Structures are given as structure tokens and as C-alpha cells.
């Protein structure tokens, strides 16, 4: 198993209990890289520090999470954005960003999410880097937004969708990731089955809990096995695709 290389394309290791232990356990299972998504000024700094401490293993993104930012003052939003811009050249990608219509319910909140999402995708494009995108209860709106924004490198994290949505992803050459929910949830399983493997990434979103257990990157091989079973792929094939996406699409150098 450990001879196969994997990536956790979306997680929040700054929120893990014992990050050092979890990362070395993950590395022992063949995890080659972990995408640490910042969500606010504080966690952006934490993810950046982690990528320095675990160089070549932790790759960091600078983000403004749509669920969080609607609770910030205008001043706090501007402050977070200044931090993102200040370290944009060093960031490996941008995220977590996107739309969240579960928590963003008013017109003002949704406009606010869209404003910072637009800033983030423009910055990512200017730096030729990827955006990792959240789309809770706003999947079609998020796809339309990204098309209008002419976003180039996109990872739709914890995504699922119908044939039409898959066509948009494929036509744009974007990626979408599935995580531990693919182990149990039929709608995620059918999405993983239908999405071409070239467009599919694995993630954990750790420390999000599944069945009451907080996830981290050590869960990736289990997610990989399930995806392979669903798609009739060998672990070697899936592992190669994951490495190719990390290297050629994200431009990561593990
Ligand atoms: Zn996340």
C-alpha cells in the first residue's frame, strides 16, 4: 500500500489534534501531499506556517471561507483580504473560497460571498494557481459563477452533481473531489462513478467527522479503495492520476 502515492487535496490540518503525528502516519501510508486550506486571517497564517514546517508535504492555500466571512465586520473582511494579497505569491493555491447558501441566506450575505469569491478567483488567475471551492447548497450557482469568472484551475471540493454539471466540469478541465462520504453516501458514490477519473481528486476535509470520528489524511487510502471499487480501476491507476493532477494541474512539487 505504501508504495502507492496519494494526495489529500482538501483538508484543514491546522485544526487537527496532533498534526505532527497525523502527518507522519499519513506519510507512512503513502500520502505525498496535503492541501491545507486557510479560511480566515488566523488559519491562513497557520496553514502557511505548517507548509514551512512540513515543506514538500503540506501545501497551503489562502482563503476566506464563505460561511465564516459573512459574520465578519467590513474591517475584518478587508484585513483578511490584505493578508491574502500580501502572501499571494507564496501560496500554493487559493482556498477555501466559494458560496454557501445554507449559511448565507440574505441577499446581502450572498452578495458578500460573491464579492470575495470574485476577488479570490481573479487573484488565483493572475498567479496561475488553482482555487479550492466550497459550494454548499449552491452547486449550480457556483458553477455558473466560475464560468462567468472564466476561472481556469478549479477544485470543486466535496462536490457532487448530475450529468449536466459533470459536463461543465469536464469541458472546463476542472477537478472535483470526493472524501470519506463516498464510503457511505449513495449520491456521492454515483457522482464518483460518473465523473471521469482525470477530473477526480481525493480529499478528507479533516478534521470534519464521519460517523463521529474526526478525519485526517490517513483516511485517503480507504477513500481510494472505495473509489477504485466504484469505478473498476486499479489502485495503481488512481494513484498515478492523483500524482499527475498534483504535478501538472496544481503545479505542486512534493
Ligand atoms: Zn474545507
Image: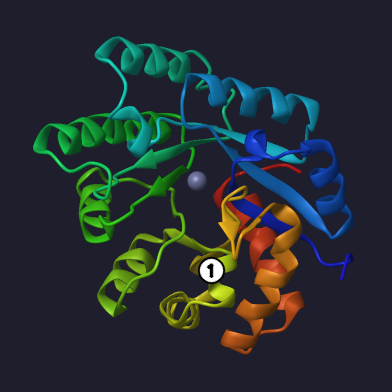
Residue farthest along the front direction in this orientation: 212
Query: Residue at point 45% right, 31% down?
Result: 63
Q: Quadrant of the C terminus?
A: top right
Mark 1 surroundings within 10 Å by alpha-carbon count, few (fewer than 14), some (14 through 19), many (20 or more): some
Asked if disc 1 is less than 8 Å from ligand 1, the answer is no
Viewer-proximal residue among 222 and 55: 222
Q: Is residue 196 left or right of residue 55?
A: left
Secondary structure beneath label 1: helix
Query: Residue at point 63% right, 29% down?
Result: 47
Query: Residue at point 24% right, 49% down?
Result: 101
Q: Is residue 179 above or below residue 208?
A: below
Residue 239: where, in percent of width, then height? 72, 68
Viewer-proximal residue among 138 and 242: 138
Quadrant assignment, res 171 = bottom left
Residue 215: where, in percent of width, then height? 66, 55
Residue designated by label 1: 181
Q: Is residue 221 left or right of residue 141?
A: right
Q: Is residue 54 above or below residue 42?
A: below
Amino acid at each position: 500500500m505504501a508504495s502507492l502515492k496519494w494526495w489529500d487535496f482538501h483538508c484543514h490540518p491546522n485544526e487537527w489534534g496532533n498534526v505532527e503525528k497525523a502527518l507522519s502516519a499519513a506519510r507512512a501510508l503513502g500520502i505525498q501531499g496535503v492541501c491545507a486550506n486557510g479560511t480566515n486571517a488566523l488559519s491562513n497564517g497557520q496553514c502557511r506556517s505548517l507548509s514551512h514546517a512540513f515543506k514538500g508535504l503540506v501545501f497551503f492555500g489562502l482563503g476566506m471561507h464563505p460561511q465564516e466571512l459573512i459574520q465578519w465586520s467590513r474591517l475584518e473582511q478587508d484585513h483578511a483580504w490584505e493578508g491574502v494579497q500580501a502572501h499571494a505569491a507564496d501560496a500554493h493555491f487559493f482556498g477555501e473560497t466559494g458560496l454557501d447558501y445554507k449559511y448565507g441566506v440574505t441577499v446581502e450575505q450572498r452578495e458578500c460571498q460573491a464579492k470575495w469569491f470574485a476577488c479570490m478567483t481573479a487573484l488565483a488567475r493572475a498567479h496561475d494557481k488553482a482555487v479550492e471551492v466550497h459550494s454548499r447548497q449552491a452547486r449550480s450557482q457556483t458553477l455558473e459563477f466560475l464560468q462567468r469568472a472564466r476561472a481556469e484551475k478549479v477544485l470543486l471540493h466535496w462536490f457532487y452533481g448530475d450529468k449536466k454539471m459533470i459536463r461543465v466540469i469536464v469541458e472546463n478541465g476542472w477537478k472535483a473531489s470526493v472524501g470519506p462520504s463516498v464510503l457511505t453516501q449513495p449520491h456521492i458514490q454515483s457522482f464518483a462513478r460518473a465523473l471521469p477519473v482525470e477530473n477526480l481528486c481525493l480529499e478528507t476535509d479533516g478534521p470534519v467527522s464521519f460517523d463521529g470520528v474526526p478525519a485526517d489524511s490517513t483516511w485517503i487510502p480507504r477513500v481510494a479503495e472505495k473509489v477504485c471499487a466504484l469505478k473498476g480501476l486499479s489502485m495503481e491507476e488512481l494513484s498515478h492520476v492523483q500524482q499527475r493532477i498534483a504535478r501538472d494541474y496544481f503545479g505542486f512539487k512534493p
